[in-house]
Image (cartoon, rainbow, N blue to C red):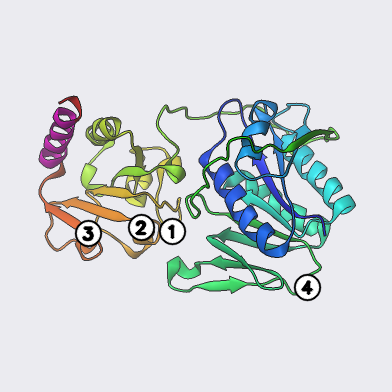
C-alpha cells in the first residue's frame, strides 16, 4: 500500500485549520503503520501552501492542477485522486468533513470499491486503520475497521476533532504536480453565490456566540455580532432562528446543522433542545444566557445567566471591550 493520503482544498488564501488537523491524524496512522503521509492539494493557493504541509508532517505533496472551472472542479479532483489511487493503492484517503467532501468522497469510494467512513473524530492503527465516530447525536461511540486491511479506506475528518501538531522548522516535503483531466460537470452551474464573512469559519472557531428563538428577529443578531466581534468569535444559530429566516442556514448549529467544538460556546436565547445540544456537546465550556430559569440548556451549561439577553449581552460586550482596551 502507498501510504496515508490527505486531500486538501487550498482556495485562494491560507489553508483552513482542518488541513493541519488532518495531517496530524494522518501522521498518527502513518507512524503506527510504518507508512508515509502524502498531501494532495488543489486550488488557487495550492502551490503557495505546499511547503507548510511539509513542515506540519507531510512527507510528500502533490499539487493537483485543475482547469479552475468551479463547475468541473469536484469532478476533476475526484477523477485525479481516483486515477492516482488506482495507480498507487493508498491505505487511507482523508478529506475534511463538509459539503465538498460529502459530494466527492462517497463517489470516490464507489470508484475504488473502497470502504467509506464519515465524520471521524479519532483514528488509530491496530493491524488496520480504526476510525472512531459518534453517531446518534453522540450517544454511541462507534469504532469502524475496514473489512480488509488490504483495501483502501476513505474517511472524512470532523473539524476540531484533532489538535494540529506544531510545524517543525527545517522539515520539508518533496513537491510534485499532477494535471487533472478536465471533465464536464454533471449539472450546468449558472452562478455561484457565497455569503462572505470576515469572521472565523463556524466549524473551526475557538469561540462561538449563538442565538435562538429568544433573539426575536434578524435585528436581534446584531447584539450577538457585537459580542462576537469583541471576542474574535464566529456567530451561530439554533434551528428555530434559521427556520424563521432571521439568519442564513450556513450558521445553523445542531444535529441538522454544523457540529462545533469550540473552547467557549455562548448560547443566547437558546432553549437547549436535544438536537441543538448534539451539535455543541464537544465544547469545552458552555455559557447559557436565557431569561427562562427552567430552560433545558442550563442542565448542560457550565455557566448560566438567568437574564434577558438584550440586557446581559450588551453589558458583557462592554465589559470585555473595557478589559481588552485596558
Lower sequence index among marks 4 and 1: 4
What separation in Å lies between label 4 and label 3 (alpha carbons)? Answer: 43 Å
Q: Which residue is mark 4?
A: 148
Lower sequence index among marks 2 and 3: 2
What separation in Å lies between label 3 and label 1 (alpha carbons)? Answer: 21 Å
Camera-side mark, 2 or 3: 3
Q: Are marks 2 and 1 in contact (CB under 8 Å)?
A: yes
Task: Determine whether the residue tagged by mark 3 lies in a helix, strand or loop.
Answer: loop
Q: Which residue is mark 3?
A: 302
Q: Is residue 223 left or right of residue 138?
A: left
Residue at the (22%, 33%) spot, across then down? 223
Q: What percent of the width, then of the height, locates residue 196?
A: 47, 27
Is residue 249 visible in the rendered structure shown here? no
Camera-side mark, 4 or 1: 4
Lower sequence index among marks 2 and 1: 1
Lower sequence index among marks 3 and 1: 1
Q: Which residue is mark 2?
A: 276
Q: What percent of the width, then of the height, locates residue 302?
A: 22, 59
Task: Determine whether the residue tagged by mark 2 lies in a helix, strand or loop.
Answer: helix
Residue at the (22%, 42%) spot, across then down? 216
Q: Main secondary structure of the magenta part?
A: helix
Q: Is residue 58 left or right of residue 135?
A: right
What separation in Å lies between label 4 and label 2 (alpha carbons)? Answer: 37 Å
Lower sequence index among marks 4 and 3: 4
The quadrant where residue 15 appears: top right
What separation in Å lies between label 4 and label 1 (alpha carbons)? Answer: 31 Å
Lower sequence index among marks 4 and 2: 4
Amino acid at each position: 500500500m502507498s501510504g496515508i493520503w490527505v486531500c486538501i482544498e487550498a482556495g485562494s488564501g491560507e489553508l483552513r485549520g482542518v488541513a493541519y488537523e488532518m495531517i496530524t491524524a494522518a501522521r498518527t496512522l502513518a507512524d503506527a503503520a510504518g507508512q508515509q503521509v502524502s498531501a494532495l492539494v488543489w486550488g488557487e493557493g495550492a502551490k503557495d501552501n505546499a511547503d507548510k504541509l511539509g513542515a506540519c508532517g507531510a512527507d510528500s505533496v502533490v499539487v493537483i492542477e485543475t482547469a479552475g472551472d468551479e463547475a468541473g472542479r469536484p469532478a476533476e479532483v475526484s477523477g485525479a485522486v481516483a486515477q492516482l489511487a488506482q495507480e498507487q493503492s493508498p491505505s487511507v484517503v482523508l478529506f475534511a468533513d463538509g459539503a465538498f467532501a460529502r459530494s466527492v468522497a462517497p463517489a470516490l469510494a464507489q470508484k475504488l470499491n473502497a470502504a467509506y467512513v464519515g465524520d471521524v473524530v479519532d483514528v488509530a492503527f491496530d493491524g488496520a486503520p480504526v476510525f472512531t465516530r459518534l453517531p446518534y447525536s453522540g450517544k454511541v461511540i462507534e469504532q469502524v475497521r475496514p473489512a480488509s486491511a488490504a483495501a483502501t479506506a476513505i474517511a472524512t475528518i470532523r473539524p476540531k476533532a484533532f489538535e494540529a501538531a506544531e510545524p517543525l522548522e527545517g522539515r520539508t516535503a518533496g513537491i510534485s504536480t499532477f494535471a487533472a483531466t478536465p471533465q464536464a460537470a454533471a449539472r450546468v452551474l449558472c452562478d455561484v453565490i457565497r455569503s462572505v464573512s470576515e469572521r472565523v469559519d463556524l466549524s473551526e472557531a475557538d469561540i462561538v456566540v449563538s442565538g435562538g428563538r429568544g433573539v426575536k428577529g434578524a435585528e436581534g443578531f446584531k447584539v450577538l455580532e457585537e459580542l462576537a466581534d469583541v471576542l474574535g468569535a464566529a456567530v451561530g444559530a439554533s434551528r428555530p432562528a434559521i427556520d424563521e429566516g432571521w439568519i442564513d442556514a450556513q450558521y445553523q448549529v445542531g444535529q441538522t446543522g454544523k457540529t462545533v467544538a469550540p473552547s467557549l460556546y455562548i448560547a443566547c436565547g437558546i432553549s437547549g433542545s436535544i438536537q441543538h445540544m448534539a451539535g455543541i456537546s464537544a465544547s469545552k465550556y458552555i455559557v447559557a444566557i436565557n431569561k427562562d430559569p427552567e430552560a433545558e440548556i442550563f442542565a448542560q451549561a457550565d455557566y448560566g445567566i438567568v437574564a434577558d439577553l438584550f440586557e446581559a449581552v450588551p453589558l458583557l460586550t462592554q465589559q470585555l471591550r473595557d478589559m481588552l482596551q485596558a
